[in-house]
Amino acid sequence: MSIPKHRRELGSSIRKLLESDPAFRPVAYMSMEIGIKESLPTYSGGLGILAGDILKSAADLGVPLIGLTLLYRKGYFQQSFNSEGWQTEKPVLWQPVQELTLLPNKVSLTLQGRDIQVGVWMHEIIGNTGYPLPVYFLDTDFDGNDTEDRKLTWHLYGGDEHYRLCQEMVLGVGGLRMLRDLGYNNLELFHMNEGHAGFISLELMREQGYYDPEKIKEQVIFTTHTPVPAGHDFFRFDLIERVLSHEALLNLKRMLPNSDGISMTELGIHFSRYVNAVSKKHAEVSRRMFDMPDIDWVTNGIHPGTWVGPGMRRLFDKHIPGWENDPGRLVQAVNLPSEDIWTAHQASKMRLLAAVMEQTGTQLDPDVLTIGFARRAAQYKRADLLFSNLKKLVDVAGGKIQIVFAGKAHPRDDGGKAVLQRLLASFEKIGAIIPTVFLENYDMEKGALITQGVDIWLNTPIRPREASGTSGMKCAINGVMNFSVLDGWWIEGWIEDVTGWSIGPAPSEQDMMNYDESLDAIDLYDKLEHKIIPTYYNDRDRWVWMMQRTIALNGSFFNTHRVIREYCEKAYSISFRGM
Ligand SMILES: *Cc1c(COP(=O)(O)O)cnc(C)c1O
């Protein structure tokens, strides 16, 4: 097939390889959100940033992935607070045309009996060895589409179930049609980052023209991210009937019989050849939840080049050549000169404190132990555990710590907003003794600033709800120790008094759903008082020794270069050549 000239110029070497090498097998990586940089506000948190980091590592390593997601013209919101401390949201004003290239391709899709034209924008991630990796953003906001349908690509996780079902049809069905229209005709491997793109199997079946589940399964890889049943999208058949064609409805009923609707996770699990969770613990939980013993795990990571601070990067470049594309070499970080590590860290800290000063007017002290906590304000993340006993906190840490917070609650999550409101109230109460700041609009830029510039990273989710977590990994590559509940990745990264500290009991089968949460708070205050504060102020050598181990043991492993290699071996059957 000949590709029009304008596409060839924009297109990547991937497409050229597709044409020239029949054995070449690219992988479409499909995700409801992809976070590449803060000026592309098409992500809300960890899921999207992981997707971006995976694609960036693939580009660095020359592994042929193709990103596919939706555009979100209204972005993931601008955060502010009213006088009661209640979060309010405004759309992000951004211009796709300044960030992306609109391609001429259009495909159509029928939802609710109406024809929708789906268009596409492209961004190329250029790997650090020059490999261009395309990311496609689907868009329905075009003249000619019904007003309602134009809005389908406005909001990330906005609207109701109906809106979401339509969006997921655009991603899964529209997405595959678009890939074909772009010229990826022999593309036959699709990696779904979470279940949102699950309708890809419906479209594969339509392409096939007959029902052969094995043939669909051969082409699909599924990564699950949600360890609780309520977190999975479920669409009842009566809703599906109102949106999809009768034929599609019958096909879905055939694919998941004995059900009164479609769970996107079940669809993903039953129609893929390889299913993985995102940490060892999460795999154990998922196997039980879905009664599927062969769910594998590939523990998440972060993209080294995106998240390492400039000072640390200079140090790594000098002492550990080649670390960026072979982060396993960071094991050598144990030999980095102690003074240089400390200086690089303090420089990151000064950068953070300057931003805090600019944005809040609060002057923090570079010589005071600084605790960071930045996350989506979902209730299970328990942002308020540190403040659950203010008297105790002031007793053990008054005058000895300062705290930097950030995080957005989902616009529809009043529980999360209430957590933020309580937090801000706690800050007012203790602010005179423990300086505490809240940085609004947590995004990738703030995430980098905070994870590089604090001294320890606090993480207090309710077990086993943190499938993996990635912000603590961003800290690790910067030599910032984790102080965390044993959940998600931290179970694998934790060595007490070496890479950081645990909070609360070791995870066991029994603590799956119910355990005494007050124990976590007691342990938190106890370790802060007896281990962390004394080490920071009285044993700087030991502290820096821990920073070295944190980079060497955790930075070397919890990165997306290693994740890509695992996917190549276990899921894609791509023999890994590297670049
Ligand atoms: C890294 C990051 C996340 C994900 O962090 P978790 O530890 O998985 O909660 C979310 N939002 C932003 C802006 C980030 O940079």
Image: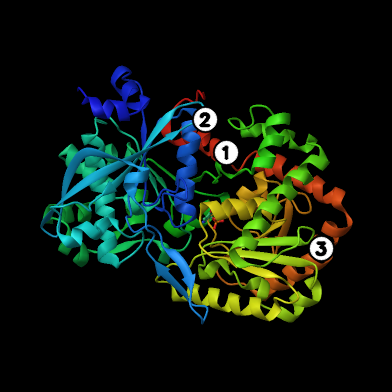
Direction top: furthest residue: 20
Q: Is residue 137 left or right of residue 241?
A: right
The one of 482 and 420 positioned closer to us in this rendering:
420
Disc 2 residue: CB within 8 Å of ligand 1: no
Q: Count residues near mark 3 (Cα–Cα under 10 Å), then give few for <14, some for 14-19, many for 20+.
A: some
**Identity of the residue drawn at 28% across and 26% down:** 8
Identify the residue position indicated by label 1 in the image. Answer: 305
- Look at the picture and state if 14 lies above or below 284: above
The one of 318 and 200 positioned closer to us in this rendering:
318
Q: Position of residue 197 (x, y in %)?
A: 32, 49
Q: Position of residue 80 (x, y in %)?
A: 48, 70
CA distance for labels 2 and 3 = 40 Å
Three-letter code for the amino acid on which mark 2 is drawn: Asn
CA distance for labels 2 and 1 = 9 Å
**Identity of the residue drawn at 36% across and 61% down:** 157
Three-letter code for the amino acid on which mark 3 is drawn: Ile
- Look at the picture and state if 84 lies above or below 50: below
Identify the residue position indicated by label 3 in the image. Answer: 533
Q: Position of residue 531 (x, y in %)?
A: 82, 61
